Image (cartoon, rainbow, N blue to C red):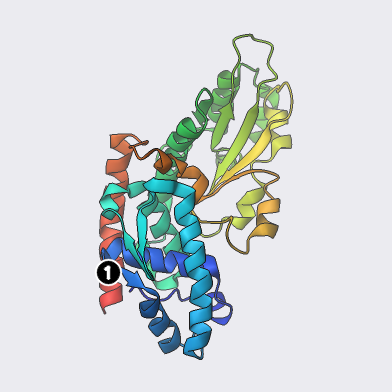
Amino acid sequence: MLDFPSKDASRSDPRLDVLCDWIEASALFSGTPVSSVDAREVLVEDKVCERQDAADDLLADVWRLLRARQGLLGDGSPFRFKDQHIEAAAAWTDVPEYAYCLAVSYAFWDTPTGKSFGSDYTEQGELFENLTQEALAHIFPGWSVHHTGWTRTKAQKIKDVVRGVAGFLGNAAREEAIAAWDLDEANEAGLDMVLMRPFSDTAGFAPLYFMQCASGGHWKPKTSEPHIKTWEKLIDLTYAPQKAFASPLSLLDGKNKHSILKVDGIMLDRYRLLSGYRTGKPWTSPALRKKLVAWLKPRVKKLLKQAAS
């Protein structure tokens, strides 16, 4: 199995969502089934649990949550169960969307893994935004998705980002306000994605969401973004958009309620974003799948080497 996540909170108060990510990552990236006995041995040896019976009680809850996760993705789940074993239903390269989200999540919970992945989150963030964009197109057929396009490798001035969003919405940009915000550090003003359900008329008042995508470990401060009042100053909006937040972590089955409430809008965590797996068919583009696999390969290699040492 992969190393048990190293963060202190995981050991002093083991979280079910962390344990599930650890077990899933062990099964998916090694290609080897993981049993509750395997997990129990690690929990006792690492002194996460003092006794075997305490570990068994904890793992009973973990296994229930793992099965619940499988149910969210239906027959397209990357995992299957045999008695008290969980195993990958496919190679991780065949489910790169899930593998990406799981690797990022495990790296968040395990400090050595996070460090081995590197401190530059540019490519990781861009991949997640591209994944979110394609996921939204699948989840919301008939809706229009606009990616603001600001990245560290393809930086745009805030005025270009705002004008792009305004053009997508068919609203006027407020040039005086843009000039006041035309600073290098303004970036995309907290907005990564715009989701709109257009109508055939031009009256406006269409369902509209402004979204923040956060792939890194420091996601909690970003739950307050984007700041809608700022965007109301930058664009002549017909009405205030609703907010949305996307994360590759599994946030709806853990102790994250307080942070999620700060989103004040739609939360799209791993299982909502990856609900395309329920179709049993590919739902992302070949180009994105290729990029995800290329990003993952050296990192999966590090995961397995770290576990073997």
Identify whether 180 is placed above or below 236.
below
Q: Position of residue 208 (x, y in %)?
A: 64, 28
Q: Is residue 16 visible?
A: yes
The one of 135 and 243 positioned closer to us in this rendering: 135
Report which residue position mark 1 lands on.
304
Looking at the image, residue 127 lies above or below residue 205: below
Residue 65: % across, % down: 51, 63
Q: For the N terminus, give its image quadrant.
A: bottom left
Residue at the spot 52% in from the left edge and 33% down from the top edge: 157
Count of numbered marks:
1
SS state under label 1: helix
Which residue occupies 50% across, 26% down? 141
Task: Name the residue located 44 percent from the left edge and 82 percent from the top edge.
Answer: 43
* Image quarter of the C terminus: bottom left
User: Which of the 4 quarters of the picture holds residue 8?
Assistant: bottom right
- Identify which residue is drawn at 30% across, 51% down: 295
Q: Residues within 10 Å of mark 1 (few under 14, many from 20)?
A: some
Percent from the top left, x then y, of residue 258? 70, 59
The kind of residue on which mark 1 rests is Leu
Position of 169 relative to 232 (above/below): above
| Residue 6 image position (x, y, % from top left) | 46, 76
Q: Is residue 236 above or below residue 123?
A: above
Q: Is residue 155 visible?
A: no
